[in-house]
């Protein structure tokens, strides 16, 4: 398609470009992409790979007093090829949770790198304080927050088995793409435990500065958790 920069009829496209980060009307040189577009594509791909294989900075976790436990993932390659390895805590991690965490909390906050360590570094400093303010405003009590290395969404059920929270929220890095490598999601569940299905969870996705604003997401999570407590349910049965 002709580049809008050289098109007299490009005004509608210009309006679309202002509303999306997607690669629309990128232009070409003959049959090839423009050099600047190809270089930007390679940069975005490299950032996505770095997000998957990166590590959450120790100072990010220390700033919120989050101790760390691990799943049974073993290695990053094992984590990528065997998703189930990230859905169960390692034996040592399970024992540490029982030892260090408040049992049967009303709200359990869990943070995990998931598929983007960068998402945690970039968004947690805004999401977590806003979430804690929202919990206070909604009259909810927080348990002992912690970080899970190598976690998948299903790990919230294993944590639920061990700690028996009323509601649990998992802040986890999303699979990175070529638009952003720092997107976070918040998965929430009422009475999580073994056998829970995806339909019994709620999620706020695309949490990053150019998506769902982190501070706004933190505030909204607290409101949803209050509704789960009030209605004693989550997922598709929750009336929002």
Image (tube, rainbow, N blue to C red):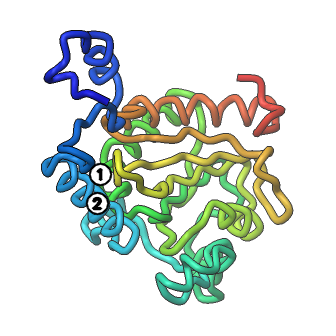
Residue sitting at x 14%, y 51%: 35
| CA gap, disc 1 and disc 2 | 13 Å
Disc ID at residue 39: none
Residue 174 vertical placement versus 91 (above, below): above
- Secondary element under disc 2, as helix, strand or loop, is loop
Badge 1 marks a residue whose secondary structure is: helix
Residue for point 37% across, 57% down: 120
**Frontmost residue, 190 versus 213:** 213
**Identity of the residue furthest to the front in this view:** 30
Up-down relation of residue 97 to residue 110 (above or below): below
Badge 1 density bin: few <14, some 14–19, many ≥20, Cα 10 Å = some
Q: Which of 90 and 178 is in front in this view?
A: 178
The relative height of residue 132 versus residue 145 in the rendered view (above or below) is: above
Camera-nearest residue between 235 and 181:
181
At which x and y percent is residue 197? Answer: 81, 53
In terms of image quadrants, where is residue 156? bottom right
Q: Give left or right: position of 223 versus 25.
A: right
Mark toward the start of the polypeptide (1 vs 2): 2
Q: Where is residue 55 in the image (x, y as percent from the top left)?
A: 34, 73
Q: Residue at x 64, y 80 (%)?
A: 82
Q: Residue 216: horizontal and vertical position, in percent?
A: 41, 29
Residue ID for mark 1? 122
Q: Residue at x 86, y 62 (%)?
A: 195
Q: Where is residue 231 in the image (x, y as percent from the top left)?
A: 80, 30
């Amino acid at each position: 398609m002709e580049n809008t920069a050289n098109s007299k009829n490009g005004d509608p496209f210009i309006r679309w470009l202002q509303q999306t980060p997607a690669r629309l009307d990128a232009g070409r040189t003959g049959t090839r992409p423009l050099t600047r577009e190809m270089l930007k594509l390679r940069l975005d791909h490299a950032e996505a790979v770095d997000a998957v294989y990166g590590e959450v900075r120790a100072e990010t976790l220390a700033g919120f007093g989050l101790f760390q436990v691990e799943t049974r993932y073993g290695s990053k390659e094992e984590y990528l090829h065997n998703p189930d390895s990230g859905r169960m805590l390692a034996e040592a991690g399970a024992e540490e949770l029982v030892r260090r965490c408040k049992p049967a909390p009303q709200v359990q906050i869990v943070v995990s790198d998931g598929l983007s360590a960068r998402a945690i570094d970039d968004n947690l400093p805004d999401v977590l304080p806003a979430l804690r303010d929202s919990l206070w405003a909604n009259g909810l009590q927080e348990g002992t927050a912690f970080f899970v290395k190598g976690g998948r969404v299903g790990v919230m059920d294993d944590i639920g088995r061990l700690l028996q929270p009323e509601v649990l929220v998992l802040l986890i890095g999303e699979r990175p793409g070529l638009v952003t490598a720092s997107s976070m999601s918040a998965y929430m569940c009422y009475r999580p435990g073994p056998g829970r299905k995806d339909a019994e969870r709620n999620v706020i996705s695309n949490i990053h500065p150019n998506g769902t604003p982190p501070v706004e997401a933190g505030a909204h999570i607290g409101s949803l958790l209050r509704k789960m407590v009030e209605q004693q349910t989550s997922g598709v049965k929750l009336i929002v």
